[in-house]
Image: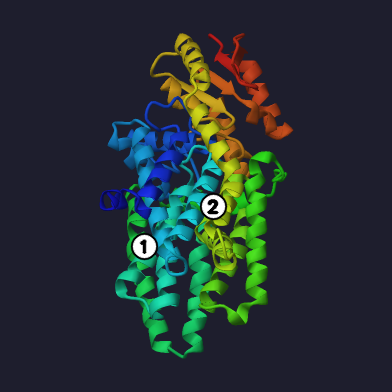
Amino acid sequence: MKKIFSPLLSPYTILFIVCFFSLFKNPGAPFSHGMPWIDSSVFIYTAKRMIAGQLVYKEVFDHKGLTLYLLNIAGLKIFNGKWLGIWVLQLLCYFVTTAFLYKTLRFFYNKKISILAITTVLLYHGIISFGGNLTETWALPFTSIALYIFAQYFVIQKKFSVVQLFLLSATFILTLFLRLNLISIWGAFGIVVIFDLMKSKRWKELFVYALYILIFCLLTAMPYFLYAYIKGIFGDFLYGYFTFNLMYLSKVVEKGSLFTMRNLPLIYFGIIILLSMIYSILHFDGIRYKEFVLATGISFFVIAVSCSMGMNFYPHYFIQFIPVLIFPLAACFSFFVENLPKRKWIFAVSFWLIINIYLIGINVKDIQRNYSKADKTFYAQLDAIVSQYTASDDKILEMGNNCNIYLFTNRESSSKYPYIYPIIEKDKRIEEYYLAEMEKSSRPQLIITDYLYELLSNNIKSRINEILQENYEKIDVNTKNGEIYYSIWKLKSN
């Protein structure tokens, strides 16, 4: 009997089951009625327009990297445009992440402690991922593979093979072309590796590693640049992904509050990280694998800086912590096992329950919400209104930041900017281009504004309101989704 159940209860089986459970809160889950979150709706819409032949950055604008759109396109292709394909890719993403995190933790801790730590970060990820399909989530498998290779260097061999250098380079480039500030792991661990090689005067190895990494990075990045060049969007690509993102990060808006019940795990996991770092500093001489601990500490600092750059403190930014968060969590579980003479695993599991009971509750509630029809009812009503006033080939315009409107009405945006908040506030050129589009004779048949439209600056809103008052009439219909109101404007007849 033990031989039968042993494979079924293997660590990887347990991790897969938890991954599977966590993903049932995502909109693409089988038979769900959930809606993509704001960011996800933009990525899916952009991927759909690319499948239809439009060029990202030039004909449909978003400012994330090409890796993200390729993943969404691949997911849509798997099930003929259905979100289930994206969900399947996310399941693969989750499992690869947890598998490599488990392999990494096993260098330091036993199987049980490793499982407790990784299931905790999975539940933590669930409550801040807002339905998945986020850039931070897609980066996790690449980050986890890189972390495993760095752990092998510091713990086992103090050298890299050619295959490992290729994997480090490829995962770095794939992550770089998701979003620019998701590469903290490579930066932090890379710096410590360089100093380790310099300290031991292994200059030849340092030069060879650098040369291999440069070659492999160029080879991995080449398809992106060739695509942009062949499609004639090289300048748009450089502006959309590099220039605009620097502007996006440099202009600070009002910070969101972290001190809400929903974000409580961010606070107590932050306390665990802080205590772990203080312990590492005070007992640094007695710690094994000092370079690895140092690189982990640097990673915490760099990721914290990355999460605080530019825009609001959105909770999903903290997904970046997951690969390195496993170490202080595992250390906490290990404390009970190593220091308690009796019933040590009872205390370890009790601690797991204390820090996870809230996370489990939130995940269960989100899964229930994902299978509720409330949001879909709103979009069905909105689709009926749009169908009443437009033909299937008419274009509409959503002013705010909700591309679900295009997805559920099967209509195309009349503008290359399918959403405007907050990007219109970041570059005056976008404002002028957007307003110039609205002044053209081929105006959208319907314009829909959401609550984010109200957050635009008074100057921009006044210019848009002039166009609306002159060329459009407001439709008197009930367009309320929960506590969020939408306004619909119909193009006046000539």
Q: Are marks 1 and 2 in contact (CB under 8 Å)?
A: no
Q: Amino acid at mark 2?
A: Val
The residue that label 1 is drawn on is 170
Q: Nearer the viewer, residue 242 or 104?
A: 104
Query: In the image, residue 142 lies at what x, y percent?
Result: 41, 57
Q: Residue furthest front?
A: 342
| Direction bottom: furthest residue | 201
Amino acid type of the residue that numbered disc 1 sits on in the rendered structure: Ala
Residue drawn at (62%, 12%) of the image: 474
The answer to whether residue 48 is left or right of residue 275 is left
* Vertical comparison of 188 with 3: above or below: below
Residue 44 seen by the camera: yes
Q: Is residue 492 above or below residue 138?
A: above
* Residue 296 vertical position relative to residue 289 in the rendered view, above or below: above
**Camera sees residue 26:** no
Q: Earlier in the sequence, mark 1 or mark 2?
A: 1
Depth check, mark 1 against mark 2: the one in front is 2
Structural crowding at the residue carrying mark 2, measured as other residues with C-alpha within 10 Å and reported as few (<14), some (14–19) or many (≥20): some
SS at mark 1 in the image? helix
Task: List x then y, in percent, for residue 153.
Answer: 41, 75
Q: Give the residue number, with chain letter if any, for mark 2.
A: 349
Secondary structure under tag 2 reads helix
**The one of 347 and 135 positioned closer to us in this rendering:** 347
The residue lying at 43 percent from left, 18 percent from top is 394
Relative depth, front residue between 273 and 446: 273
Give the camera-side residue of 169 and 155: 155
Residue beneath the point at 67% across and 22% down: 466
Q: Find residue 3 and report its horizontal and vertical position in percent.
A: 26, 53
Q: CA distance from mark 1 to mark 2?
A: 38 Å
- Could you say where residue 386 lies in the image, as x and y percent from the top left? 48, 14
